[in-house]
Image (spheres, rainbow, N blue to C red):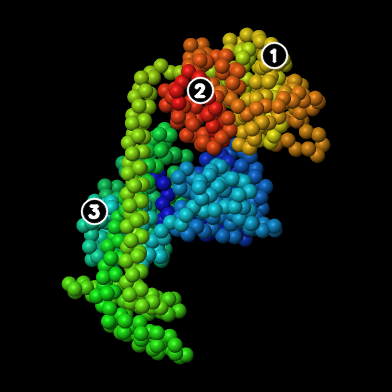
Amino acid sequence: MQRQLSSFDIYTVVSELQELVGCQIEKIYQITRDEFLIRLKNIETKDKQKLYIRNGELICTTKKTLEIPTKPSTFAMTLRKYLQNGRITEIIQHEFDRIIKIKIGKKEGEYTLVVEFFSNGNIILVDPNENIILPLIRQAWAHRKLKGREPYVPPPSQIDPFDLTLEKFSELIKESDSDIVRTLAVNINLSGPIAEEICLRARIDKRLGIDKLDDKLIKKIFDTLLEFLELFKEKKFNPVFVKKDGLVVDVLPFEFISYQNFDFEKSDSVNKGFEEFIGTKKVEKKIESKTEKYLGKLNRQLDQQKVTIKKFQREIDIKKIEGDLIYLNYQEIEKLLNDIKTVLDLKEKDDEIDRINEIEIVKKFRPTENLLEVNLKDTTGNHYDVKLNFRKTVAENAEKAYADNKKLRSKLRGAEISIKKTKEKIESAKKENKIIKEKQKKETKKEQMFWFERFRWFISSDGNIVIGGKDAKTNEIVVKKYLKEGDRYAHADIQGAPSIIIKSKGIDDESIDISKETLEEACIFAASFSKAWKQFAEAQAYWVNPEQVSKTAQSGEFVPKGAFIIRGKRNYNSCKLEVAVGLIKIKETKKVMCGPVNAVEKRSDKYVVINPGDVKKNDIAHKLAKTFDINIDSFDRVLPPGGISIKKAKGVEL
């Protein structure tokens, strides 16, 4: 299937997966990085079921035989630990988003397996207290973090088309400055295929601009949408395969008239239809550079700012009209407000409230909700709905409308300044992206990659290769594969630090004794690439001999992945958290190296010395990329993990 699952696909498949409620989880497998299989048993019938999940792309039951790995992954083991033998109590769609929550009951409480189908997808195990135990992918945004021990916070709520009124629908449509099909897809949360289907069913040109739509056409589209949604509400599904040249390319809950020049073939269910796509992957998206991602973000921001400005302009006009209308209908409104004041003083006021609601200019009067909405006429005979505060005078209501108009004009000026700045940033990013692409075209010769570049690395002042892990997995690799007799092991005296190996050899595999200076440099490297960088100015690090490093735990001990037990004396160094980054040559190949200042100074005339600071790592990487005229990724992957400040530069101007 060449498209992502939409909220409607999730709605449909969740309704079909209700047959799994009550089933017991027998086993969980991680087949590949993104594919999972949950083996289930129906407690009553003893029937076996298999639930297949492909992260971010697909979910369905299956009878296919899939190759199961002999060794379970850490993520699969964690899922088994908490969910095995539990019973599925509920399968729901979160609001109307592309999120499925599978709730599993155990003696200690109800766990939730959250499956997210937007962006790059995710699968998150959540405990009975709504805290994350483990996500498949650790992620962080301004409003939420997906990592262990954090509360699970879903993304901001999306528009639910099932809850829309004509008034709200019309408001969302009019906020757009795009064509109708894009507006339905984005503003109304319908997805591309369904937006096109609604346009065709309503007999509206999908390319029609929003400014060409009047209230009559908007209502026609809304009524068509309601008819379409009714098929989902009533679950009137008649699933079909969509075929092109004999190949299945999609699955729909019923035939869409927008799928012209396609063949349809009946399917037992959408769920069974999805099973056909197990073993087929989506076409991989083009990998964007950081500059292209940044440019995309700015363009989305610009679109949103344009919508905001249009909204402000419309509200400014409305507030001015409201103020004028209130004064124009002064006597009629004053009489109404006095009448309401008298009614509110009564003990029994229900009949009088009903009477006020019958007054010609009154549209809604609900005193318990502090709501008074009137319909006022201007000099040309046009009618407008205006909300009034019935506890204020006519003049106070009018002045409030004019004051709101003034505030909105101030906000509009701010928004116009912001949009100007965004456009300037876009132009700057476009220029930068053009320079990068031109440079990439020139670089026809493939850069030589060395074995140690898989890890954190630097070349010591004496020429020793020093490598370190980037995570738990590579920590295991550098120790188990590369720590040999004659080498040394270094580590910062803080949790969350890389394992560092000082090789007793150089670039050409020549033997090089490990000096005291090299050991000190390795300790600085270990401390600088640890969590200490984000917290301190100095840190302790130590080095030991290879035979002191062990993975074998004593009875009752547990050694997690990427960690090791150190036995015997540790040789400590107090390390200032300061490194340098510069261009060096290795076998006539230019490389960006980040390491202790002495080591970089020895090999480069152009370098920058950095300390822990407040500037984001990505911003520093951008700056260095421009300064050295090197791809930003070369700097991004070698800089320490956290905020940075630049202490000094040699041979370059910042």
In the displayed orientation, state which residue is furthest to the left.
380
The amino acid marked with disc number 1 is Ser
Q: Nearer the viewer, residue 423 or 230?
A: 423
Classify 526 as above or below 77. above
User: Which badge, 2 or 1, is on the more N-terminal residue?
Assistant: 1
Label 3: few (<14), some (14–19) or many (≥20) C-alpha neighbours in 10 Å: some
Q: Quick check: marks 2 and 1 in contact, CB under 8 Å?
A: no
Q: Quadrant for residue 492, please give it.
A: top right
Q: Alpha-carbon distance for marks 2 and 1? A: 28 Å
Residue under pointer 2: 649
Give the side of residue 462 with respect to residue 444, left or right: right
Which image quarter holds the N terminus?
top left
The amino acid marked with disc number 2 is Ala
Q: Residue at x 37, y 65 (%)?
A: 164
Q: Nearer the viewer, mark 1 or mark 3?
A: 1
Instruction: Give the percent coordinates (x, y) of residue 246.
Output: 33, 42
Label 1: few (<14), some (14–19) or many (≥20) C-alpha neighbours in 10 Å: some
Instruction: Give the percent coordinates (x, y) of residue 556.
Output: 80, 39
Q: Residue at x 27, y 74 (%)?
A: 327
Classify 381 as above or below 525. below
Label annotation for residue 209: 3
- Secondary structure state at the residue bearing disc 3: loop
User: Which badge, 1 or 3, is on the more N-terminal residue?
Assistant: 3
Q: Residue at x 36, y 86 (%)?
A: 339
Label annotation for residue 515: 1
Q: Nearer the viewer, residue 588 or 573?
A: 573
